[in-house]
RNA sequence: GACUCGGUAGCUCAGAUGGUAGAGCAUUAGACUUUUAAUCUAAGGGCCGUGGGUUCGAUCCCCGCCCGAGUCACCA
């Protein structure tokens, strides 16, 4: 491989250090403190606890001034300054010249406050823990008079940041907050479900028949069996089989894979949570969903109010609930319920929709909804009672013909959750899947595949059940304020650099 | 997939209406024993994304390709 001037120099210095008998890659190091512990808790220089601390981290800045030097090291909790004085480090001080920004070191010493008031470690011993060969795209920063952090020449190239997330995490330290919060959100969600006695399960990612959603799958091949396998597009059908099997509450948090376009709301692999609870319906599930989101907000962030995309969003219970056709009325001024196909087609022009004239009834309805209604749903809103044609796994509405018992939760104009009273009449389910098979035969690549074994499970019998799916990445985006899905994924899907 | 914008030193960027490039930080050497974007002095560092074309000559103009960002389409 080709090396830069700076890499060559660092490799040469590494050899110099090794010639001096220094192990540049030792096996372990005993830390007593984190940077943040010291910065927040250190009070006076007489205290016993801080007279001999040991910390470790990556060198982020070096300021050499002849026989004394300062540097900042960064650990998982933050930065702390080190003070190195030649008199105190007779063995080491000259070798320090061979250390670079990016090297990881261990330090022992006592904590003190410098003339300018910065809590620092007066170093008595320094050990190299890892030599860094490739320089970091380090940025300079200062704290201005208002106390704001000002960063000069920040590492901003999106491509490199996503491809080398490890570098991004070091240099753009603050991005880790969103990832830590992502972890806490998921953890809180698990805690909520576990405390209700629902069981976390794992179902196949490699599936001979994919289902549970309308989407194009990734396909792969199993060599020993010599069969095609699909990467799952949803957990739904397997989780319902477990409800048939007698579990009364199961959930799964894991990746789905959809072979479709990618943008700031979509990544080919994304994390979904799906939960199914027996003997419940979608009304119950709405209550549970708002309680869940409200608890996550309060327990992780200590608030139910968030600012997203310059809008204030409140996850305080209860969320608005509105029937789909009532929302049509509200935002288009028209009652679309029972409207016939020709009248509906006229609306394509009236609303300037960019869809083909011969689009299906539900496609037009769906389009009007996304264009005319969805953008208005900023605050968490349950949209309820959907047309049966676009919901092949949902149970018919108990009182409204042509509708199913389904809700979707919208926040900031985007879909966050989808749920139904699950269809458990095997005859109805067969009819609906056969219709999907027909659509498929007519060229709808996303229509569902008929899964005989799933139908067999329903014939064995599934109790009344409520099911819910939540897009975890989108939930994390809303709660952390990130507007691109790539900023809540450590490693967003990227095209390889060399095709 | 379509359109728009972008790719120049390790990083952030500037640049020339075509004559093989410049700044700040980073790096190297020197000075400096409480600095903090440390400072001061000097120096090195570039197939200007990639392949063609036009031209005496291209990093700059034209065409193709690669990668990214944004918008749209599809979707969660």
Image: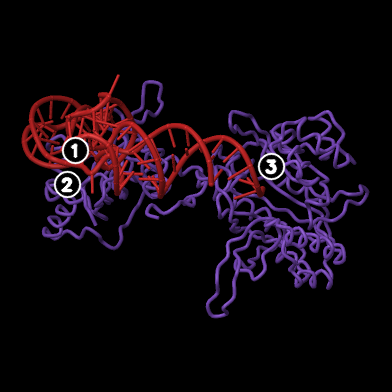
At x 61%, y 45%, the residue is A474
A414 left or right of A96? right
Q: Where is residue A488 drawn, in percent x and y?
A: 52, 46
Q: Nearer the viewer, mark 3 or mark 1?
A: 3
* Separation of residues labelled 3 and 1 (CA atoms): 50 Å
* Letter of the chain shown red in the rendering: B
For disc 3, the marked residue is A294
The percent coordinates of residue A59 (x first, y second) are 28, 45
The reply to whether the C-beta atoms of the residues labelled 2 and 3 are less than 8 Å apart is: no
- Mark 3, Cα crowd under 10 Å, few <14 / some 14-19 / many 20+, is many
Q: In the visual, does A339 lie left or right of A110? A: right
Picture quadrant where residue A315 is located: top right
Residues tagged 2 and 1 counted as in contact (Cβ below 8 A) = yes
- Label 3 resides on the chain identified as A
User: Chain A: what color?
Assistant: purple
Task: Give the camera-side residue of A218 and A304.
Answer: A218
Residue at the disc numbered 2: A96
Q: Earlier in the sequence, mark 2 or mark 3?
A: 2
Crowd band around label 1 with a 10 angstrom C-alpha radius: few (<14), some (14–19), many (20+): some
Give the residue number, with chain letter if any, for mark 1.
Answer: A69
Residue A126 pos. (x, y %): 22, 50
Secondary structure under the numbered disc 2 in the rendered image: helix
Q: Are marks 2 and 3 on the same chain?
A: yes
- In this view, the residue in front, A265 or A215, is A215
On screen, A130 above or below B32? Answer: below
Q: Secondary structure at mark 1?
A: strand
């Amino acid at each position: 491989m080709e090396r830069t001037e700076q890499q060559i120099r660092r490799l040469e210095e590494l050899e110099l250090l090794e010639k001096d008998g220094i192990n540049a890659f030792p096996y372990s190091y005993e830390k007593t403190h984190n940077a943040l512990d010291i910065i927040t808790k250190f009070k006076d220089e007489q205290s016993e606890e801080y007279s001999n601390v040991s910390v470790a981290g990556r060198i982020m800045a070096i300021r050499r001034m002849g026989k004394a030097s300062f540097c900042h090291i960064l650990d998982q909790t933050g930065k702390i300054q080190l003070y190195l004085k030649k008199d105190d480090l007779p063995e080491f001080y000259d070798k320090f010249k061979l250390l670079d920004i990016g090297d990881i070191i261990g330090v022992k010493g006592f904590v003190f406050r410098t003339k300018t008031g910065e809590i620092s470690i007066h170093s008595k011993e320094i050990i190299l823990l890892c030599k860094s060969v490739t320089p970091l795209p380090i940025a300079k920063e200062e704290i201005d008079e208002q106390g704001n952090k000002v960063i000069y020449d920040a590492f901003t190239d999106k491509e490199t940041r996503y491809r080398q997330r490890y570098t991004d995490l070091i240099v753009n330290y603050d991005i880790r907050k969103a990832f830590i919060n992502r972890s806490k959100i998921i953890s809180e969600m698990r805690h909520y479900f576990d405390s209700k006695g629902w069981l976390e399960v794992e179902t196949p990612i490699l599936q001979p028949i994919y289902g549970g959603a309308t989407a194009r799958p990734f396909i792969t091949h199993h060599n020993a069996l010599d069969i095609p396998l699909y990467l799952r597009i949803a957990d739904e059908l397997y989780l319902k089989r477990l409800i048939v099997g007698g579990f009364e509450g199961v959930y799964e948090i894991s990746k789905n894979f959809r072979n479709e376009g990618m943008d700031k709301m979509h990544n080919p692999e994304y994390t979904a949570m799906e939960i199914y609870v027996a003997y419940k319906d979608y009304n119950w599930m709405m209550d549970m969903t708002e309680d869940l989101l409200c608890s996550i907000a309060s327990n992780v962030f200590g608030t139910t109010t968030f600012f997203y995309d310059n809008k204030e969003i409140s996850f305080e219970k209860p969320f608005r609930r509105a029937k789909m056709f009532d929302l049509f009325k509200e935002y288009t001024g028209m009652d679309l319920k029972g409207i016939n196909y020709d009248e509906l087609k006229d609306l394509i022009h009236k609303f300037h929709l960019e869809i083909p004239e011969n689009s299906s009834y539900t496609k037009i309805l769906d389009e009007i909804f996304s264009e005319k209604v969805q953008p208005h749903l900023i605050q968490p809103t349950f949209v309820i009672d959907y047309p049966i044609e676009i919901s092949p796994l949902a149970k018919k509405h108990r009182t409204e013909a042509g509708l199913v018992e389904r809700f979707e939760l919208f926040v900031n104009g985007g879909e966050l959750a989808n749920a139904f009273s699950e269809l458990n009449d095997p005859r109805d389910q067969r009819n609906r899947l056969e219709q999907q098979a027909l659509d498929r035969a007519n060229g709808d690549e996303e229509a569902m595949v008929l899964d005989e074994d799933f139908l067999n499970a329903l014939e064995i019998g599934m109790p009344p059940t409520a099911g819910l799916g939540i897009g975890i990445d989108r939930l994390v985006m809303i709660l952390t304020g990130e507007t691109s899905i790539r900023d809540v994924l450590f490693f967003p899907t990227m095209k390889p650099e060399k095709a």
